[in-house]
Image (cartoon, helix red, strand yellow):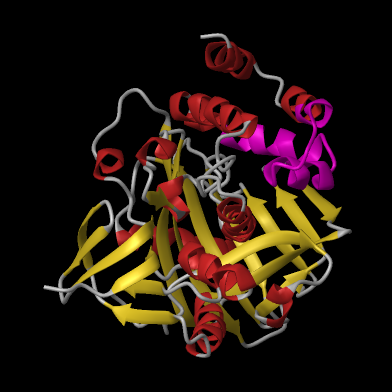
Amino acid sequence: MNHPQYDYAIIGAGAAGLQLTLKMIQDDFFSEKRILILDKDDKVANDRTWCFWEKGETIWDQLATHTWSFGQFINQEKTIDFELTPYRYKMVRSANFYAYAKAIIAKAENVDWVKDSVGHIEEQSIIGTKNSYSANHVFDSRIPESFLEKQTKYHSLIQHFKGWFIQSESTCFNPDSFVMMDYRLKWKDSTSFTYVLPISETEALVEFTLFNNHLLPDDEYDEYLKKYIDQHLQLKTFQIKEVEQGQIPMSDYPFYKHHSKNITKIGTAGGWVRPSSGYSFKNADRYSSMMIENIKSGNRPEKGIATSRFRGYDSIFLNVLSKRNDLGEDIFTRLYTKPNIQSVFRFLDEESNISEDLRVMFSLNRPQFWKAFLSTFWR
């Protein structure tokens, strides 16, 4: 049987797969290359919300549901207000992103989007449930099975959350400022907090989030959301317009070991999620650009991606929180209040220098960090 033949196949039309496709379409180097996108879904729903910070205006501003120039960090003792300038915090809903990407892709004559579920890949051969395909190089966003198995040699947490998009009857939100973390309500003695993104004076996404490995029963997330809205927002009457729920792996697992000559892992499967924070959308943008330049230079696509010294820092962070999850509030209080927020953003964006890194690390001055630091860099 003759399989459809492509130069590049992208498995998974999420943030990573679609951003990589868009970068290819926009570069003349790929104008004569045949590109295949495979995904089992139509990609029309608001199945997730991406938030990130960046400087100035970019293409994402046109898709943003809302942006913020001010933020808050709240713990048991105080509220810390911070200004993000020159950064802004931005929210992009997935339905807007999918529609934007699909409109551009539909005009590209060298790109085929096929609705199919991929079973397995044998180097350049892709076996789907509806058909089989061939590609010179495959970009695969499926998470390796070995990661899903129980790991004992790596540090891993799950960022799990449930959020409600709520509408209030009265004006109660400040749409100019968001709440990065509010630790006044926690699940037991864990790293857990509430995240509040006001969209208008009467609308907001309120999300209860945990960084641990203990998933809650669905109704327990609801109880914490109700309690937060009642006690801290002091809202007695509101409507739940949408519900958002998800899990994001935070791990120092070596995803890069799953790259091969003809297969490159992307997205979560490629280690594109920043393990210490769970942020990924900006990484998908940045790493896609790096991959394009690597390909044009004749290098392997993954060269220099998700393998920097920052992954060592992430391993330290995960090492500490996996052993002492109760330290989360103190760690994040130190992180967001000792250095200025701009230096934290540079650090999390992997744009800081060694001197800045050390200032951030010294702000987390706890013996657990120094022990983890020594075991990570001098083992």
Left or right: 323 as drawn, with respect to 150:
right
Can you give x and y, in whole percent of width and height, for residue 127 in the image?
18, 64
Q: Residue at x 42, y 33 (%)?
A: 254
Residue 350 is a magenta residue: yes
Q: Residue at x 48, y 87 (%)?
A: 109
Q: Residue at x 35, y 23 (%)?
A: 153
Q: Nearer the viewer, residue 99 or 103?
A: 103
Residue 132 is a magenta residue: no
Left or right: 212 as drawn, with respect to 351:
left
Can you give x and y, in whole percent of width and height, for residue 353 in the image?
80, 32
Regarding residue 233, the answer to whether it shows in the image is no
Can you give x and y, in whole percent of width and height, for residue 75 in the image?
68, 44
Regarding residue 371, the answer to whether it shows in the image is yes
The quadrant of the picture occupied by the N terminus is bottom left
Q: Nearer the viewer, residue 239 or 327?
A: 327
Which is the main secondary structure of the residues drawn in magenta?
helix
Q: Residue at x 71, y 49 (%)?
A: 74
Q: Nearer the viewer, residue 137 or 196?
A: 137
Q: Dividing the picture into quarters, in which one does residue 64 lie?
A: bottom right
Can you give x and y, in whole percent of width and height, for residue 8 in the image?
41, 65
Above or below 305: residue 326: above
Direction left: furthest residue: 1
Magenta-drawn segment: 328-357
